[in-house]
Image (tube, helix red, strand yellow):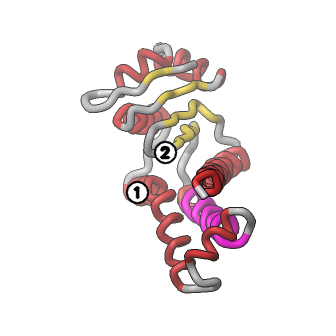
Amino acid sequence: MGGNLAVQLLALLMTAAAVLVLHEATHSAIARAYRCPTVCLGISPLAVSIVFLDRPTRGYVILQVALPLAVTSVATHAGFFALPPVGWIAQSLLPAESSLQLILCIVLSLLTSYGDLSYMLADLRHPLEGRERLARDIALLGRTGSLVCFTPFGRRYVAAELGLGPRELVEAASTGGARCKVLC
């Protein structure tokens, strides 16, 4: 039974990781469709964040929330309730097609998209572009203690536009609280 529990826990964690990867891949696909280059990737205990150099139009901002939220909802339902092996585990705990399954999917999707929702509200009220947007995003990575990896484009952009290296940018943006570390 103990070994079976370990396998079930591993399957559950892998399913959760797959849902998170799909969520971030959706953000990335939207940014690529809008031709927004990737500046860096941040990984923290709370989330995975991708920082794009984007210009937030109303449609783009709403799409960056709505589509990942929908993908997360579908992936959560499929991964936790429909597909084996996790689906079998969850079905043994929750009745099939119960409202609890729907509520769980909605709650997990909203938790995954909470940061996206708060950014959307901020962007719709006061959209930031260029340096200001990058500073806000890097400051958030600093507050969450993220490990940050800059893309080649991100390194070139930070050097050309700000006259800083990635480490200097992160140090300047990380005021108080947790500090992030630049991996690459």
Position of the C terminus, as image quadrant, is top right
Q: Secondary structure at mark 2?
A: loop
Residue 75: image location, x then y, percent: 67, 64
Q: Which residues are magenta?
A: 62-82
Q: Are marks 1 and 2 in contact (CB under 8 Å)?
A: no
Q: Amino acid at mark 1?
A: Ser
In the picture, the quarter occupied by the N terminus is: bottom right
Residue 47: assigned label: 2
How packed mark 1 is, by other alpha carbons closer than 10 Å (few <14, some 14-19, many 20 or more), is few
Q: Nearer the viewer, residue 129 or 26?
A: 26
| Local secondary structure at mark 1 | helix
Number of other residues with Cα within 10 Å of mark 2, as a class: few under 14, some 14 to 19, many 20 or more: some
In the image, taking residue 81 as reference, residue 146 lies left or right, namely left
Q: Look at the image and say whether residue 76 sits in the magenta stretch.
A: yes
Choose the circle earlier in sequence order: 1 or 2. 2
* Residue sitting nearer the eye, 1 or 15: 1
On the image, the x and y values in percent for residue 74 come to 66, 68
Q: Is residue 124 visible?
A: no
* Image quarter of residue 16: bottom right
Residue 148 drawn at (x, y percent)? 51, 27
User: How far separated are the C-alphas under marks 1 and 2?
Assistant: 14 Å
| Amino acid of disc 2 | Ala
At 57% from the left edge and 37% from the top edge, which residue is drawn? 53
Q: Which residue is mark 1?
A: 118
Q: Nearer the viewer, mark 1 or mark 2?
A: 2
